[in-house]
Image: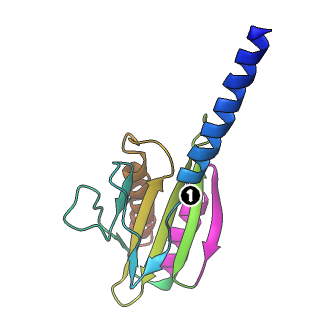
Amino acid sequence: MSKIIRHFVYTATVLILGGQLAACSTPQLGVNNGKFQACSSAPHCVSSTEKNTGKYIAPIKVNSAQDWQRLQQLLLAMPRTKLVAQDTNYVHAVTSTAIMRYKDDVELLYSPSAKTADVRSSSRIGYYDFEVNRDRVEKLRSQLNGDNAGQGQ
């Protein structure tokens, strides 16, 4: 009988902690006054609006509306990436890790006058991301630049 009770307590504990973890993973997203929400203190986020911090990553150079469309296509073509929200100059997508299906949020904010797209990429759970978010942004940048170089831009 005690084995059944232990199993019940273990299962209940896992469900309660899982629910709390899911609540903690609700992302703070969107743009306010032309800037993304601030990254948390954990080192699993990069943002081009987090200047003078270790979380800073340069915005992506976007020379034209066509480049902006291409950047969005490149993001959505990444494996396990789904579009969540899209506006004229804003995109929010969610990517999932291959094995554990952890979710990362990726946001792009296009500024035609500055010819850039601000970018924010952040893991929803965990502490370290092992540079996955930074690598993702740099891959997008590289793919867009490679495409631009191929078009003579």
Q: Quadrant of residue 45?
A: bottom left
Question: Which is more toward the observer, 33 or 3?
Answer: 3
Residue 36 visible in the shown view: yes
Q: Which residues are magenta?
A: 66-87
Across and down, in percent, residue 81 comes to 62, 55
Decide if residue 19 is on the left or right side of residue 118. Answer: right
| Kind of residue at disc 1 | Thr
Q: Nearer the viewer, residue 30 or 65?
A: 30
**Residue 18: which quarter of the image?**
top right
Eyeballing the image, is 59 above or below 15? below
Q: Position of residue 90 (x, y in %)?
A: 52, 78
The residue wearing badge 1 is 26
Residue 78 shows up from this direction: no
Question: Where the C terminus falls, by quadrant?
Answer: bottom left
Q: Is residue 150 above or below residue 100?
A: below
User: Mark 1 falls on what kind of element?
Assistant: loop
Colour scheme in use? rainbow
